[in-house]
Amino acid sequence: MSSFIQSMNMGTPTIYRRPSVTAQLLSAAGLVLGLALSSSPQSSAHISGIVIAGIAGLSMWFSHRRMHQTLQRTLETERLWQAVAKGCEVGVMTLAARRDQVGRFVGYEIVQANPRSGDLFHTEKPLQGQLLLDVLPSHLHAAFLHRLTCAIELNQPQVEEHAFTRPGSKLPVRWLHHQIVPLDDGLAVITRDTSEAHHAMGVAREQTAFYRTLVDCLPMAVYARSTRPSSAGEYVVWNKAAAEVMQLPADKVLGRKASDLMPPDVSRRGDEQDLAVLRDPRIHHFPNLTYQTPKGERIVDLIKAPVYGVDGEVDHILSIARDVTDQRQAAEQLKLASRVIDETGDAVVVSDAVDRIVMVNPAFLNLTGMTPAEVVGRSAELLGMPPLRESHLPGVIQALKGNQRWSGESRQVCQDGRTLDTWLSVSTLRNDLQKVTQHIRVFSDISVLKAHQRELAEQARHDSLTGLPNRRAFGERLNQAMARARRNPQALGVLYIDLDGFKGVNDRYGHAAGDRLLAEVAKRLLTCVRLTDCVCRLAGDEFTVILEGAGNPGEVVRICQRIVERLSVPHDMSGDSVVVSPSIGAAIMQASESAEAFCQRADAAMYAAKHAGKAGFIMSKDPVASDGETMPLLRQGTN
């Protein structure tokens, strides 16, 4: 143990070794020589012998005294270190090579071990006398033997650390750290329990991994720079979001400064911000910062905060950067969309899922003459808009269910009673669950267009020269009159009128004069019939008259006579007096007669009147035969 103690690194006291054998022999030789000379008869030799013997004896006495004192100090030191070894928290063992009877190496025997060693190796038997490999679990034999061999061959201390547990033991796993020290006559093994350190390191690693994962999972860029003198300005934290925004991976950033990575203006701006935080250690906000990245220019809102160390000084400056480029662009788009809605000429109405209005644009207010306070929060149907129901807007339910836009004509009733014709488009907005959250109506006032369409439709049914209903209108009105005559049994007559000699007027006086003549004829015809009758111009000089409720044939005859008389009055044509007489064919509707057959009878009667001498009329009393020939006709009027 004493040789081990002398080799301990914790500090070895000075051990005085005993005098060398040569010194002792010289002292003994001097003593013998002195005794021999002191017995000489010569006084000088006798005195010299006494002196030499005295000096040699004194030297031997001092040597013995020093050896005794050294032995006492060694024993005291031995007891002291033995007490230390027994009471300390580390295990201390000395090993020596054991050989069998034929000198073969068997293993390393534990020569000495303090009580703590038994506790660390979970053994109840004394360690002294056991082989080291019998104490250690089998899976540690190879590594431990390698360390022991290296310590002896290299004559240098070795270190081994492992998790120690015995098979079948319920005791928790223990981490042991071994320092193997070579000695002159063996090895010393100093064992420490490092379980708590390993546990603390494990907890620290878990916390580090947790916080690193937490920081990496944050949706905003997080980074930190050191303010310590030895590493001032170096990045010590750089999460994944920062790497994505700046397109710089963490392994290329950590441990480097901004001036090595960023453009000079960005680096200088960051240094100025950090200096502001150091001067005023609080949270600072730096909004709307622009950064040029490989993905283009990005807009960042930056927050910087001081991070204090254990000494109370600022160790780092933490930065949290939120990329607001997409949000700013979305806000700009929303602002633009809002402006477009406000500036558009079409009325826009947004209502909620139950069709209560939540927003309208200025065009709607201008169109209806209402204010936002009168509109927002009220039901769309109560404001005169068509409700989104099948009975009001056919097809709208199916279109909206299929996420399609519905478009069509609709009527808008204003608060002042005006009714507007509108072109309406309806669509819906849905949430993630596909439930309707808003209805959107976009409509424009087409009242002027509809009025123009009605005017054009009306013009399409009237003759542009005379203003009378044309052939198309004649057919529609005749069908309507025949339907009324069947519902309410009454007489219905039709007159077909053709002007005699009109072609000669056109040829002699020109088409303009002929047009004036036709217009005058139309006016005269209107004065010959009742207000309930309808005068039409079919084409050229052909006219028709629908006589509803004619009563009897006699009344039809009187009207025909009146037409013949008034149309036969001469017309002034460039100073010439021109007479254009009519030839009229009349027919009374039969109960089961079609409109085509009815008109054919009147037309046939008109042609019969022309062949009979013109300037007269003929009444058709019987339907037209199937072979197209007329039945005997009754001539009325004069030729």
Image (spheres, rainbow, N blue to C red):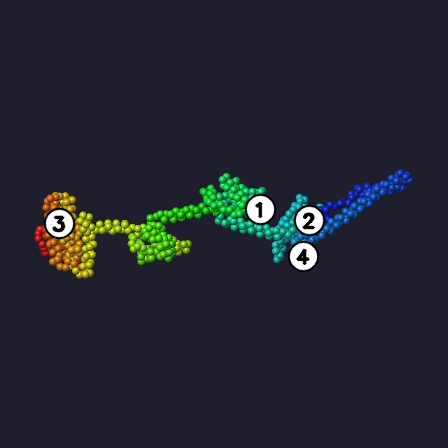
- Judge depth for marks 1 and 4 and give the one in front: 1
The secondary structure type at the circle numbered 1 is loop
Q: Nearer the viewer, residue 62 or 340?
A: 340
Residue 385 can be seen, yes or no: yes
Disc 2 to disc 3, C-alpha distance: 147 Å
Residue identifier under label 3: 499
Of the image marks 3 and 1, the number of the one nearer the N terminus: 1
Q: Position of residue 280 (x, y in %)?
A: 54, 45
CB contact under 8 Å: marks 1 and 4: no
User: On the picture, is 400 further left or further right than 543?
Assistant: right
Of the image marks 1 and 4, the number of the one nearer the N terminus: 4
Q: Residue at x 42, y 48 (%)?
A: 331
Of the image marks 4 and 3, the number of the one nearer the N terminus: 4
- Count all numbered tags in the image, as a single digit: 4
Disc 1 to disc 4, C-alpha distance: 52 Å
- Judge depth for marks 3 and 1 and give the one in front: 1
The secondary structure type at the circle numbered 3 is strand
Q: Position of residue 328 (x, y in %)?
A: 43, 46
Residue identifier under label 1: 313
Amino acid, disc 1: Glu
Residue identifier under label 4: 124
Disc 3 crowd, CA 10 A, few/some/many (<14, 14-19, 20+): many
Residue 480 higher or lower than 187, as above or below: below
CB contact under 8 Å: marks 4 and 3: no
Amino acid, disc 2: Ala
Residue identifier under label 2: 188
Of the image marks 4 and 2, the number of the one nearer the N terminus: 4
Q: Nearer the viewer, residue 242 or 520?
A: 520
Residue 351 can be seen, yes or no: no
Disc 4 crowd, CA 10 A, few/some/many (<14, 14-19, 20+): few
Of the image marks 2 and 1, the number of the one nearer the N terminus: 2
